[in-house]
Image (cartoon, helix red, strand yellow):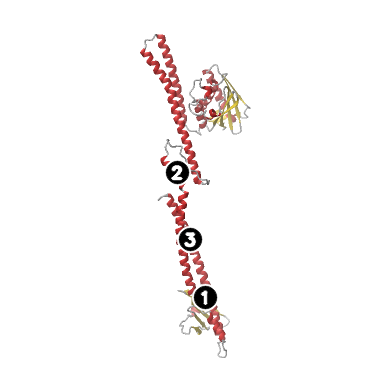
């Protein structure tokens, strides 16, 4: 059973239950009202009969004709009226052909309660004890008009119930069909979505309801997937290009050496060039493997506490060994009040890689081979700023600094692969931090690491 048919059926059943309860309630209320009203009418007839008979209890009394007519103007359908004395003997009855008898137990019960109402089949009875004269009045009748009205009411309520049920079923089906339309479109879109058509989007409703949110979230998911696939394609394209260049160079030099008779010095020159190309390939491969490895890592709550200033000093020492002519200066914007202010929970080796890449980038792309590092401690986060003198990035370049193999226009003549900041970005993600770039002025670049404090 489809979801829309199930929803329409459930909604119809719910409305059917409400209509059924309402119809039964209306019928019961009217039934009780009609019954109570007719009991009052029967009682009134019994009391009028009592007044009429007691006025002719003695032969001397003459009953006016008007009173006799008054008694019979409101006569009930199949009316039966009986007046009994204190011993249970019939004093008078209507009609005269009425045959009935009452037990002493029944009369005692009437005397005890004063008034007793009951019903047998469609006939309603009212038995009354009159303490002044010790008489018993037993009046009864059939509410034909009320019974016919009940039958009409049953027919009306049944018609309303069935009609309402049919209308509800039709409208609920169309309503559910329209309400679930975005879900059907989503299902179709998911069925035919591949990496070749990630640009297709679901139509978004103007009303900001849950289905609109589903469509919007699905479109946003497609945008993220499309961006991820584009980055992956770009990554593969650039990686293959970067690997192809040194390999082609190595193949060319090898073929040249094989086809010619060269001197020892020429062979040494070719081997040196091949070694340089091999080192480039190794460096690029290590960077790619490192980035792929970090993509699979996840944050770990069991990581130890790391003191950032000590980590920076160790990284600076490693950089000085590799690049002796570099100058790296480190300082605090303000001294920390306690040791916890400069502690973060993380992987020391990964954080060293991030710091190393930022320092190395700052040195390579600066005009004076100098990098200034400043730690700024805030209430909930720690900001580590890396500043260098050099050509600043444009807004477009700043937005793409974490894209693998992306390189700004100002560094095209400097050796590199554009993977350093991608690695930094992934390391910071694992530590719930992020990377910011800002141009302090026309000649100073500023990269800022933001890490949450312990």
Residue positioned 48% across, 43% down in the render: 203
Q: Is residue 112 visible?
A: no
Observer-nearest of 407 and 52: 407
Image coordinates of residue 184 in percent, x first then y, are 44, 46
Residue positioned 43% across, 15% down in the render: 273
Query: Which residue appears farthest toward the left when viewing the image?
Result: 259
Q: Is residue 209 above or below residue 414?
A: below
Where disc 3 sits, the SS reads: helix
Q: Is residue 184 above or below residue 55?
A: above
| Picture disc at residue 116 | 1
| Mark 3 Cα-neighbour bin, 10 Å: few <14, some 14–19, many ≥20 | some
| Mark 2 Cα-neighbour bin, 10 Å: few <14, some 14–19, many ≥20 | some
- Say whether marks 1 and 2 touch (CB < 8 Å): no
Distance from label 3 to label 2 (Cα)? 35 Å
N-terminal of the pair, mark 1 or mark 2, is 1
The nearer-to-camera label among 3 and 2 is 2
Q: Left or right: where does residue 110 sit relative to residue 258?
A: right
Image coordinates of residue 428 in percent, x first then y, are 52, 30
Q: Quadrant of residue 112?
A: bottom right
Q: How many marks?
A: 3
Distance from label 1 to label 2 (Cα)? 70 Å
- Say whether marks 3 and 2 touch (CB < 8 Å): no
Image coordinates of residue 122 in percent, x first then y, are 46, 74
Where disc 2 sits, the SS reads: helix
Q: Quadrant of residue 240?
A: top left
- Residue matched to label 3: 19
- Residue matched to label 2: 186
């Amino acid at each position: 059973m489809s979801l829309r048919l199930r929803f329409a059926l459930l909604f119809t059943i719910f409305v059917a239950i409400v209509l059924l309860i309402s119809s039964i309630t209306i019928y019961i209320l009217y039934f009780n009202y009609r019954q109570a009203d007719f009991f009052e009418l029967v009682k009134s007839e019994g009391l009028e009969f009592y007044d009429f008979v007691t006025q002719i209890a003695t032969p001397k009394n003459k009953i006016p004709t008007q009173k006799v007519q008054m008694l019979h103007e409101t006569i009930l359908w199949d009316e039966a009226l009986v007046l009994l004395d204190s011993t249970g003997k019939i004093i008078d009855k209507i009609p005269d052909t009425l045959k009935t008898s009452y037990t002493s137990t029944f009369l005692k019960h009437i005397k005890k309660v004063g008034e007793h109402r009951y019903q047998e089949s469609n006939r309603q009875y009212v038995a009354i004890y009159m303490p002044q004269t010790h008489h018993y009045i037993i009046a009864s009748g059939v509410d034909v008009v009320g019974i016919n009205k009940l039958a009409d009411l049953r027919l009306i309520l049944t018609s309303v119930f069935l009609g309402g049920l049919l209308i509800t079923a039709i409208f609920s089906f169309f309503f559910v069909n329209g309400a679930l339309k975005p879900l059907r479109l989503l299902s179709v879109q998911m069925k035919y979505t591949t990496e070749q058509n990630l640009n297709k989007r679901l139509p978004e409703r103007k009303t900001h309801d849950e289905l609109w949110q589903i469509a919007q979230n699905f479109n946003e998911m497609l945008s993220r997937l499309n961006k991820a696939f584009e980055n992956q394609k770009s990554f593969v394209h650039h990686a293959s290009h970067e690997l192809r260049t040194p390999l082609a160079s190595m193949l060319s030099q090898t073929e040249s050496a094989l086809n010619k008779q060269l001197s020892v010095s020429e062979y040494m020159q070719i081997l040196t060039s091949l070694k340089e190309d091999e080192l480039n390939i190794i460096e690029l491969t290590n960077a790619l493997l490192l980035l792929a490895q970090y993509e699979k890592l996840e944050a770990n709550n069991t990581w130890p506490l790391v003191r950032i200033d000590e980590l920076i000093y160790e990284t600076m020492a490693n950089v000085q060994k590799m690049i002796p002519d570099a100058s790296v200066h480190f300082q605090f914007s303000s001294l920390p009040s306690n040791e916890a202010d400069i502690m973060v929970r993380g992987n020391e080796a990964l954080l060293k890689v991030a710091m190393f890449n930022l320092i190395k980038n700052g040195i390579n792309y600066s005009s004076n081979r100098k990098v200034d590092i400043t730690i700024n401690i805030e209430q909930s986060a720690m900001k580590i700023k890396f500043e260098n003198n050099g050509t600043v990035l444009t807004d477009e370049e700043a937005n793409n600094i974490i894209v693998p193999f992306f390189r700004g226009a100002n560094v095209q003549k400097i050796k590199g692969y554009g993977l350093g900041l991608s690695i930094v970005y992934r390391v910071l993600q694992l530590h719930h931090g992020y990377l910011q770039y800002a141009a302090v002025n026309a000649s100073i670049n500023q990269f800022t690491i933001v890490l949450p404090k312990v």
